[in-house]
Image: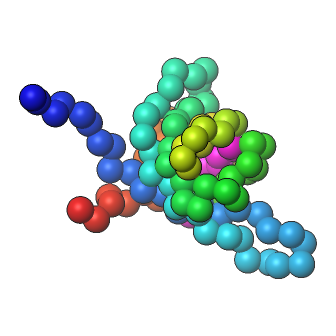
Amino acid sequence: MVNDTRVIPARLFAGTPRAAVCAAPRDVELLLVREEPAVAPERVWFALAKPARRLRVGLPLAFADPSWTAIVVGVGERGVRRLAFRPSPTAASSPAASATAVAAEAPVS
């Protein structure tokens, strides 16, 4: 038996908006699993999220790189979320790079 699976080493940390009472965003860890076809400049990915309960459909996510944002567009089982990455409307010119350019780091093996 041969295991020919591919792993994209892209672990992202995102902030979710809190209620108006709290100023600091909550941290969510995302592991990008698979990219779906999408209309440019949007990039749609399936990701494992931790903690996944916080990520409801329609929730915006902010990253360390302000030129990218993401929105939760789908909820799957066992922490899987479907995310749409988009260039931030405030960014003057966003690179046509992959979603992994959004302050990603390789997971520790």
The residue furthest left is 1
For the C terminus, which image quadrant?
A: bottom left
Question: Which residue is depicted at the point 29% across and 42% down?
Answer: 7
Q: Residue at x 67, y 36 (%)?
A: 74
| Residue 35 seen in the figure | yes
Q: Position of residue 54 (x, y in %)?
A: 70, 59
- Residue drawn at x 60%, y 38% is 76
**Residue at 18% from the left image edge and 31% from the top image edge:** 4
Q: Is residue 86 placed above or below 64 in the rendered structure?
A: above
Residue 86 can be seen in this image: no
Residue 22: image quadrant is bottom right
Q: Along the line of sight, which residue is nearer the eye, 80 or 93?
A: 80
Q: Is residue 92 magenta?
A: no
Q: Position of residue 23 (x, y in %)?
A: 80, 78
Q: How is the image coloured?
A: rainbow
- List x then y, in percent, for residue 73: 69, 36
Tell whether position 65 is magenta.
yes
Q: Which residues are magenta?
A: 64-72
Quadrant in which the N terminus appears: top left
Up the image or down, 42 lies above or below 65; here it is: above
In the displayed structure image, the side of residue 17 where residue 77 appears, left or right:
left
Q: Which percent across, then down, holds residue 41?
A: 59, 29
**Which quadrant of the view contains residue 61?**
bottom right
